[in-house]
Image (tube, rainbow, N blue to C red):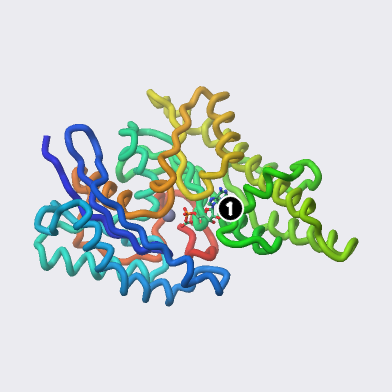
Amino acid sequence: MTSFTFLGIESSCDDTAAAIVRLGDLGGEILSSVVEGQFALHADFGGVVPEIAARAHTERLDDCVEKALAEAGLTLAHVDGIAVTSGPGLIGGVLSGVMLAKGLAAGSGKPLVGVNHLAGHALTPRLTDGLAFPYLMLLVSGGHCQFLITHGVDRFERLGGTIDDAPGETFDKTAKLLGLPQPGGPVVEREAALGDAKRFRFPKPLLDREGCDMSFSGLKTALLRTRNALIAEKSGITVQDRRDLCAGFQATVAAVLAEKTRRALTTYLKHSPAKPTLAVAGGVAANGIIRADLEVVCAAAGVRFLAPPLWLCTDNAAMIAWAGIERFKAGVGDASDLVARPRWPLDITAPPMIGSGKKGAKA
Ligand code: KG4
Ligand code: ZN
């Protein structure tokens, strides 16, 4: 079998990343993966500032690529192709990556493949576990939340997703409202472990509606109201109040995701997959309670639950290099139409996602 080695480049949000991935006889192998986060640059602004992100990507990308090549013990001459995230995302950042990749491809004569960032996440379980199509993917991060039946390298069926905030965004906002540090997810999870999830009841929007769409922005408002009512009552919230609020909030997000996953699995199973699997990606998939609830839903449906290691669930360039290899092999990676795209839905037949989150446009 031919072995393919690709350089991957990712710069669509607030992580500057480069990686080298090889496909050999035993499957995919990550030779190097460099990720430089920008957390400190945006910390004072309560969200990612697109211009600051784009500038940082432009300044750091060369260095990331050099590091990735050096860690893999290779030079550009050794790679068989270059894959770059060409959307969706914050356009300035996407452009930084695309311009660099175009320059490297022109200079080295290597093929160039544009990769959809969401396809990178969705194809990761094939890199880590050689997962066969079709499988169900739940992408749940700070910027995205959607169910995708992954039928093929270039064929995705979106069953639904958030119509407003992504769950990670809601965890971050909850932390902010309760005076906890960012990123909110891990801190809220730690506080919630010490709280009573039954003390405060929060609404579960869209649960009464059919389908797999979700909404999380009302939950944030409900939490704000409850917090304000506590402050009005006793001029402040206690440590226990905060823990109980975190626990109630987290249980609500977990319940919504679990119920919508149950529905998504029902639709997915109609395709009679040989080895039914739910794979997750995104930072929120690190949450122990959410994960445990999803595992229960999968077990009840007779479906395997698969979570790639966390460093491959969050933004990285190994997933982009891998998706580039898959596209190249399938003959669907054509650089002639490679343009940077702020929006780029994976399933163009599904109704468009509306609005944009703190990490850019929904796709
Ligand atoms: O996938 P990711 O690293 O980045 C993008 O969204 O691009 O996800 C980050 C998000 C943040 O909003 C963070 O608060 C959330 O994932 N997160 C968690 C946990 N760890 C990270 N949310 C809930 N529970 C966690 N343990
Ligand atoms: Zn991502």
Does the image show residue 217? yes
Residue at image coords 79%, 59%: 227
Say few, some or many: other residues with alpha carbon within 10 Å of mark 1 (under 14 / 14 to 19 / 20 or more). many
Q: Quadrant of the N terminus?
A: top left
Q: In the drawing, does residue 66 fall left or right of residue 109?
A: right
Question: Which residue, given by chain and number where applicable, does mark 1 sit on?
Answer: 185
Residue 349, image x, y percentages:
43, 49
Q: Quadrant of the C terminus?
A: bottom left
Looking at the rendered structure, the number of numbered marks drawn on it comes to: 1
In the rendered image, which quarter is residue 336 located in? bottom left
Residue at image coords 58%, 55%: 163
Tell whether circle 1 marks a residue whose Cβ is less than 8 angstroms from ligand 1.
Answer: yes
Residue at image coords 54%, 63%: 357
Residue at image coords 36%, 39%: 125
Task: Give the structural element (helix, strand or loop) at label 1.
Answer: helix
Residue 16, image x, y percentages:
35, 63
Ligand 2, image quadrant it occupies: bottom left
> Can you say whether 214 is above or below 297 in the image?
below
The front one of 342 and 12 is 12
Residue 292, image x, y percentages:
58, 34
Q: In the drawing, does residue 185 fall left or right of residue 74?
A: right
> Can you say whether 308 is above or below 182 in the image?
above
In the rendered image, which quarter is residue 151 located in? top left
Q: In the drawing, does residue 225 fall left or right of residue 256?
A: right
Q: Amino acid at mark 1?
A: Gly
Does the image show residue 113? no
Residue reaching furthest right? 233
Residue 117, image x, y percentages:
37, 55
The front one of 133 and 158 is 133
